Image (cartoon, rainbow, N blue to C red):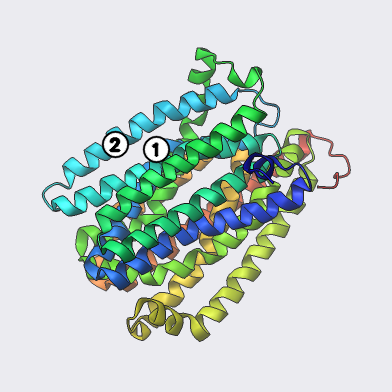
Amino acid sequence: MSLKSFLLNPNNVTRNGFVWNTMSSGLFALQSLVMLIVVEDLIGQVDAGMLVIAQAIAFLLGCVGTFGVARFQASDVKQRFSFANYAAVRLVTILVMWAAGAVVLVLRADSYGSAKITIVVLMILLKTIDVIDDVIFGYFQQHGRIDIGARETTIRYLTSIIVFTVVVVATRQLITSLIITTAASAAVLALLASITLRAFMTAPDRRFERRDLIHLLVACAPLFVAWFLAAYVTNAPKYSIDAASNELTQAVYGFLVTPAFVVSLIAQFLFNPLIYHYSLDWTNGRVAALRRRVMGMLGVILGLGAAVCGIGYLIGLPVLGWVYKMDLKPYLAEFMVLMVASATTAISAFLYTVLTIMRQQTALAISYVVVSLGALFGGAPLVRQYGLMGASLLYVGLTLTLSVCFLAITLVRMAIDARTTTSPAPLPA
C-alpha cells in the first residue's frame, strides 16, 4: 500500500476515524510528556523546568495562532466558508502569534537568560507547525473524514517524539534537539499535506473571498478570547510559579500535573469523532437528541474521573517517582487535588465544544474573562503563600468554576431552543 492510499483509505471511516483520532490525541499529549521525561532524565531538572514554562508559553501563543477557529471550522457542516478562507485566517493569526511572542520575551528579558529565551522561541516555532496542521485537520473533520486528518497528525507526532528522543540521547543538548525536531516535523507536514489536500480538495475549497475572511475573523473573535483564556487558565499555575517561585518547583508541578490530563485526553478520544454528529443534531433542530448525547458524555467523563482518581491514589505517585527518578510521596495532597482537576478540566473542554457548536461564542468569552481575572490576580499570591498546594488549588478552582458556568449556559440555551423547535426522533450516529 502506498502512502497516499494509506492516508486516503475510505474504508470504515467512522471506525478508523475513532481509532486514528485516539492515536493522534494520545501522541499529542505523549509528546510533551516524553520531552519532559527525556530532558529531566538525561539533561537535568533545570532544563526540565525551562522546558515546562516554554511549553506553557508556546501553548498559550498557539491559541493565538488557532484563534478558536478549529471547532468553528469542524462544525461548519454546511461549508459556509471555503478552506482557502480558513487558511487565510490562519496566516493572519500566526503573524499575530509571533508578534505576541516577541512582546512576551521582551517583557521577560530581564529574568530569562539567553538559553531560556532560545528554548521558548524554538517551542513557539514547533507550536506554529501544530497551528498550521490544525486547519488541515479541521478541513477533513468538517467533511466527515477525521480519519484522514488523524492519520496525518499521528505520523507527524510520532516522528517528532522519535526524533527528539534520539537527538537528546545522542547530544544531551535541549536546544539542538528542538531545532532538529522542528525541522523534521515541518518536513513531514509538508509531505503529508501535499498528498492529502491535493487529492481531496475541490475548486470551491480554493475560492478566496476577502469579505469571508473578515467575517470569519469577526465571528471567531469571541471564540479566540475564550480559547486563549482557556489556555491561560490551563497553565495559570505554571505562570504563577514562574512569577513567584523557581525552576525546581516548576519541574515538580510539571511532574505532578501530567496525569491530570488523562481524563481530558480520554474524553477527547470519545467526543472528537462525534463533533460532526453533534453539529448535525444542533443544525437540524434535534435538541432533545443533542441533550441526551451531552448528558451521556458528562456521565462518562465523571465516571472516568472517579476511576482515574482511585488509580492515582493507589499507584500514581510511585509510578511518577519511578518515571522521573524523584521521591514525590510528600506531594500526595497536591497530587490528589490535581487528579480531581482532571475531571473538571475534561468537563469544561467538552462543554466548550458543545457551546461552540451552539454558536455561544460571547458567553464562552465572558466566562473565561471572569475566571482568568481571578487567576491573574490570585495566582501568584496563592503560590507564594501555599507553594505547590496553592498552584494545585488554583487549577481545580478555575476549572470547576468554568465547568459549572458552561453547564448552566448549555442547559439554558437548550431549554430556550427546545421551546421554539420541534425535534424529530434522533437519527442514529
Asked if the residues shown at circle 1 and circle 2 are in contact, with their CB atoms under 8 angstroms apart, the answer is yes
What is the C-alpha distance between the residues marked 1 and 2? 8 Å
Question: Up-down: is 2 above or below 321?
Answer: above
Query: In front: 134, or 370?
Result: 134
Q: Is residue 94 left or right of residue 267?
A: left
Question: Up-down: is 67 above or below 275?
Answer: above
Residue at 34% x, 80% y is 325
Residue at 55% x, 22% y is 84
Query: In front: 358, or 172?
Result: 172
Disc on res. 64: 1
From the image, tell me which residue sits under label 2: 100
- The image shows residue 200 at horizontal and vertical percentages of 66, 30
Amino acid type, mark 1: Val
- The image shows residue 296 at horizontal and vertical percentages of 73, 59
Q: Farthest front residue?
A: 1
**Residue 244, quarter of picture:** bottom left
Q: Farthest top residue?
A: 210
Q: Is residue 359 visible?
A: no
- The image shows residue 190 at horizontal and vertical percentages of 48, 36
